[in-house]
Image (tube, grey):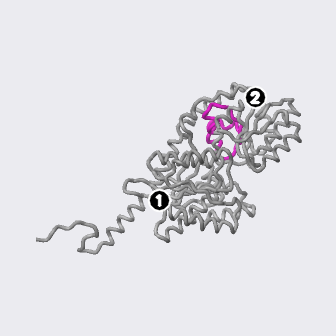
């Protein structure tokens, strides 16, 4: 850290897509605006059109650069090469703060941050799971491995940031009780994102936005629409906007369910444009931490049908009884049907949620709280350095660098 208080901050994440990367972009831009030097490291093997736009927007602002290094999702021997390449890069960047996001980013930040301590400088090692490994079943073999790694790395973490109360509770339950400081910082939006959004002229009844993975519950939504058609003769139109590994499987499911005339797929697009493609957002996720899309839709005053997972209840607040259980097509179908039939009431609830989240879910608050946390963690370090400098001066001799009076 410089004498002026300027920090050198490096964010590490594996995949530069989805809400996790949007979080990093907003956080980095806010830290740059506050006068700090910032860099971002992410995977070179993944991405989509939306992440390309984010990278193009962010890169010119990063004084420490945007660096893309191959990082595979599944842990394995190839991670040793990634650690080696990243360690050399990060040593050159000489960060004061190494902020790891997600499971893989968290591993790299803490392992490399600890190694730097042995070669001259140890940055603050900050970890924010963003769900990540916390979604695993602790009884599964993969879950046991993931949580063993998390417990080991918790010992070399200087501070934990959780984006929801749910995330912190889950970490304490599945992994361990953190012995280092913890800060809860909600994902936040910029003021212009709280402007009311009107559906486009040709909007569908429903829109589903996000990564096309089974964890996001798209298959449950398709099954729910099939039930509405068969049991209630209700056929709402749906636009699915996103990219991901399971898109082809979902497209095939739509055809098999006989829904091709009412369900259409679109590539990722800017979030406000995506939300305007429908009158009601449906979020059928099986697991989440604090999904941006629910915050974004709520800030825009848009009705949301969502599952009771992760931190979504913290967004809905007193209206969380309107959430539905995950992986339950019947419950999801019923909620979609009732929302369509009482859309005006749903919009009134959406406006109430919008007003309630305006303060806690702001990007300014997110940036300020994160920087404050860095500062709180650095204060004891600075105090120890000052104390060590005082106690190492030989008695009766001036400290090096002091100006002495001339002898007469």
Q: Position of residue 380 (x, y in %)?
A: 42, 60
Answer few, some or many: residues within 10 Å of disc 2's Cα (few below 14, many 20 plus, some between 14 and 19).
Answer: some
- Label 1 residue SS: loop
Q: Position of residue 177 (x, y in %)?
A: 58, 59
| Residue found 71% across the figure and 30% down from its top | 279
Q: Position of residue 192 (x, y in %)?
A: 55, 34
Q: Foreground: 75 or 52? A: 52
Q: Does residue 204 belong to the magenta stretch?
A: no
Q: Look at discs 2 and 1 and give the one toward the viewer.
A: 1
Q: Are marks 2 and 1 in contact (CB under 8 Å)?
A: no
Q: Does residue 304 belong to the magenta stretch?
A: yes
- Label 2 residue SS: helix
Answer few, some or many: residues within 10 Å of disc 1's Cα (few below 14, many 20 plus, some between 14 and 19).
Answer: many
Write the start and end of the magenta stretch as one range. 295-323
Instruction: Determine which of the numbered discs, if any, sits on residue 340 in the image.
Output: 2
Instruction: Check disc 1 and report the residue beneath it.
Output: 96
| Residue found 60% across the figure and 45% down from its top | 54
Q: Name above or below for residue 334 compared with residue 289.
A: above
Q: Foreground: 37 or 333? A: 37
Q: Foreground: 198 or 142? A: 198
| Residue found 59% across the figure and 65% down from its top | 85
Instruction: Determine which of the numbered discs, if any, sits on residue 84 in the image.
Output: none
Q: Position of residue 125 (x, y in %)?
A: 53, 60
Instruction: Give me the C-alpha separation between circle 2 and circle 1.
Output: 51 Å
Quarter holding the C terminus is bottom left
| Residue found 46% across the figure and 57% down from its top | 377
């Amino acid at each position: 850290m410089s004498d002026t208080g300027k920090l050198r901050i490096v964010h590490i994440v594996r995949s530069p897509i989805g809400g996790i990367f949007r979080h990093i972009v907003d956080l980095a831009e806010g830290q740059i605006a506050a006068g700090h030097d910032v860099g971002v490291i992410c995977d070179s093997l993944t991405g989509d059109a939306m992440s390309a736009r984010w990278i193009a927007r962010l890169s010119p602002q990063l004084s420490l650069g945007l660096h893309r290094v191959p990082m595979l999702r599944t842990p394995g021997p190839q991670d040793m090469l990634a650690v080696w390449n990243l360690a050399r890069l990060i040593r050159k960047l000489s960060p004061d703060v190494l902020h790891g996001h997600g499971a893989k980013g968290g591993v790299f930040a803490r392992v490399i941050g600890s190694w730097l301590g042995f070669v001259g400088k140890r940055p603050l090692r900050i970890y924010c799971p963003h769900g990540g490994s916390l979604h695993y079943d602790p009884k599964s073999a993969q879950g046991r491995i993931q949580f063993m790694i998390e417990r080991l790395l918790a010992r070399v973490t200087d501070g934990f940031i959780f984006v929801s109360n749910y995330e912190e509770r889950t970490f304490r339950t599945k992994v361990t009780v953190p012995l280092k400081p913890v800060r809860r910082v909600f994902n936040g939006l910029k003021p212009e994102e709280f402007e009311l959004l009107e559906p486009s002229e040709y909007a569908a009844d429903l829109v589903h936005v996000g990564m096309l993975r089974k964890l996001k519950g798209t298959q449950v939504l398709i099954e729910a629409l099939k039930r509405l058609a068969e049991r209630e003769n209700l056929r709402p139109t749906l636009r699915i906007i996103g990219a991901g590994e399971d898109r082809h499987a979902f497209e095939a499911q739509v055809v098999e369910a006989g829904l091709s005339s009412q369900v259409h797929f679109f590539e990722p697009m800017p979030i406000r444009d995506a939300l305007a493609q429908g009158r009601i957002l449906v979020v059928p996720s099986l697991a989440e931490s604090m999904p941006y899309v629910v915050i974004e839709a709520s800030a825009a005053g848009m009705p949301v049908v969502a599952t009771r997972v992760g931190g979504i209840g913290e967004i809905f607040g007193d209206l969380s009884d309107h959430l539905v259980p995950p992986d339950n097509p019947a419950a999801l179908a019923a909620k979609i049907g009732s929302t369509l039939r009482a859309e005006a009431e749903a919009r009134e609830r959406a406006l109430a949620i919008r007003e309630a989240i305006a303060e806690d879910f702001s990007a300014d608050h997110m940036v300020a709280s994160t920087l404050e946390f860095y500062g709180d963690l650095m204060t004891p370090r600075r105090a120890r350095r000052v104390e060590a400098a005082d106690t190492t001066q030989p008695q009766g001799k001036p400290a090096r660098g002091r100006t002495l009076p001339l002898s007469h």
